[in-house]
Image (cartoon, grey):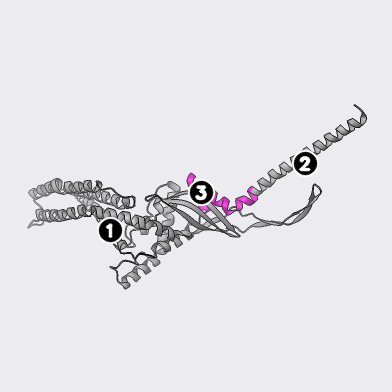
Amino acid sequence: MDDYTWRMKLAARRRQRQRERIIALIILGAIMCGVFFYFVVYTKTPEYAMREMATAYKAGDAKTFRRHVDLNSITLQGYDDLTGDLFKYDTQLTDRERSLFENFYVLIRRQMCNGAVKVINTYIDTGEWTLPGEILKGRQLGIDYDLLLDRSLIRHTSFIDLEAVDHQGDAATATFNIVEDYTQTPFTLKVTLKDLANDSFNVGSADFELFGKQIKFPGLTFNLGGSDWKVVSVDNYREYLDTVSPILKQNLSDYIDATAEIVYRYNRAFEEDQDIFITLQRSPYGIMTTQQRAETSGYITDTIIPALENRQAELDQVPVPQGAQFLAELRRESTRVTILAWQSYITGITQNSAADLDTAASLHKQELALDQRIEEIIHNSAVAKNLPELP
């Protein structure tokens, strides 16, 4: 091999190694840019925050989920959407009564929303829907919180996936695909996000040469405060309610109509049973005799309890639309508690047990509360039938 050829091959090898080093540098630069973009840019975007929130929700990661959701702001707005027309179409209320109820719901807004935050936080932590207790327990505020939660749809709405995120400066919107479980109604929920981080740094513009060409790098501002994008409002929650609620109300109305004859027939029979029960207990001395106790016990065992069981058996034969499941379960629970109350009463009068009589009284109070809830649902369903047709 002559000297010229040798020098040409050495030059070619040097050019090859130079190209390889340049390619390696380009690849390394691309990797570094990718890592830089991911950790310094992408993790500070609303897209990242929403995907992280969605993953956390599915995985039960409560801490991460809470980091991206401002529950206090969301529930305050949602409460207004939920209660805005609660009494609007109830023709049994006077204008003054309607105004009083509406003002009352405004006054208890903070307590109600705090309760909702507690309910949601408990569900995030445990996967169980529970009532908040405290001032919202029972009817201490004159409302049935459980019914209001059911009306909100929160306990029977499932998250499907994140659809899109639209980013505009320090605000963004995201859309999620959800489904209402009872009716399997799909819906696209739109939320607003705010960037609550403040710390940032600026990379100024620069000019440099690459492969003989002048490259201009624009100035960029990067956030140092971490991914602090939070959902602060659900923008179309009212629309979601308006989409699903009529279907649920129709389901409920159909179920109430389908069971109306059963309920009416047994209510008439229970009224007769009550008259006989009162007659059996009458005593000139205010204390039942041994024979009265035995006859009363026998009447409850042979007539009243079987009638309750038969009524529930007939109700269970009626197909229950998904939107009426809540009412059907309340009726089953009412029957169960009522039978337990009667059984405790029997033990109390036949064994002269004050403890069992106290248990019977406590169970009777539970039954009355359940029956009141059932009546409210039926009343609200009747009101819903009279809603005006919207154009």
Magenta-span inclusion, residue 143: no
Return the residue at label 3: 54
Left/right placement of residue 377 relative to residue 1 reads left
* Residue positioned 33% across, 64% down in the render: 387
Magenta-span inclusion, residue 48: yes
Nearer the camera: disc 2 or disc 3? 2
Magenta stretch, residue numbers: 38-67
Which residue appears farthest toward the right when viewing the image? Answer: 3
Check disc 1 and give the amino acid type: Ile
Q: Which of marks 3 and 1 precedes in the sequence?
A: 3
Any part of residue 146 in sight: no
CA gap, disc 2 to disc 3? Answer: 41 Å
* Residue positioned 88% across, 33% down in the render: 8
Return the residue at label 2: 22
x, y percentage for residue 335? 23, 49
* Residue positioned 69% across, 47% down in the render: 33
Check disc 3 and give the amino acid type: Ala
Q: Which of marks 2 and 1 precedes in the sequence?
A: 2
Q: What number is the disc on residue 378?
A: 1
